[in-house]
Amino acid sequence: MRRARFAVAAAALSVGLSACGSDSTTSPSSTASGPPTEYFSGTIWPGNEASYAFTVNQYGVITETLGSVTLPGGSRAAVDATLTIGFGIPSGPGCGRSQSIDTKSGLMPQLGASVAAGIYCADVSAPPNAPGPFDFVLRIVHP
Amino acid sequence: MQQTLRPSRRAAVVLMLVTIAAGGCSKNNPSTSTTTPTPTPVAPTTTNEFDSTVPVGGSAFYSFSITQYGTVNITLTSVSGTDVPPTVMLGLGLGQPSGTTCSTTSTTNAAAGATAQLTGSYDVGVYCAKVSDIGNLFAPANFTMSIAHP
């Protein structure tokens, strides 16, 4: 009988201790998705600026690619125009640029920088003497 | 002579052992929790004036950075324009820039005045203050908004 009682006590302890496992964590399953990519598109007029805010969740690299510059309207004809793309922190009515570059559209990133977590902005501007408004697409990849 | 436990007493012993064993789990022990002191928001140290125009049915916003936890005061100080009464109610909002807009988390409707119509305490970060037409405008409204923040 004493042995049976010991077995009952041991079982009870075992049940109680197993409850400690409730804090165990499950490893997240791996995903194949890459860093967040956002597309900023619009129409830019000569002498104007357009900006777009986005959130960076952790330290990492931001890249910007001016993917296309076309004539507005239905033609969608690509134009060989140079625009200014930049990035920085939203400030006032626009984007407080910390880096910028004059570029034409392309397939590879034209601008990149390492940043900490926070809210940032990308912007596109056209020089005052640009030959007319343009439709643009800016690709932003960030952590 | 061997002592025997009655079933009810045996159940009580088992229950007690389970309780003791489970109590050994210290992760969720409330006695170990700590209380984080509530920080005191600092007063505004910087004031930005934002002069712009709200189109009919539209909005305008202004971004600013807060460098330490503190109080933000938004004051719509004046509204004017052709066919725009200076007492017209507009929407005021405070939030964070997102995409091409200001995503507001705190809003109110207010007419222009000398005292802050929207106030709150905010952590370090980038924020935006927004003025919008709430359906009262028949013509674009020029406005001045004062944003005081740490």
Image (cartoon, grey):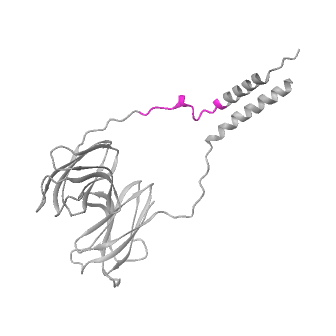
Say which residue appears at 23% left-offset and 75% top-offset.
A46
Foreground of the two, A17 or A86: A17
Q: Is residue B88 left or right of residue A60?
A: left
Foreground of the two, A96 or A75: A75
Q: Is residue A43 left or right of residue B141?
A: right
Q: Which residues are magenta?
A: B22-36
Q: Is residue B25 magenta?
A: yes
Quick check: B111 above or below A132?
A: above
Which quarter shows the N terminus of chain B? Answer: top right
Which quarter shows the C terminus of chain B? Answer: top left
Quick check: A21 above or below A93?
A: above
Foreground of the two, B70 or B145: B145
Report which quarter residue A45 is drawn in.
bottom left
Say which residue appears at 70% left-offset and 37% top-offset.
A18
Quick check: B100 above or below A27?
A: below
Q: What percent of the width, then of the height, locates residue B17?
A: 71, 27
Most common SS among magenta residues: loop
Q: What percent of the width, then of the height, locates residue A80?
A: 32, 82
Say which residue appears at 65% left-offset and 37% top-offset.
A20
Residue, far top: B1
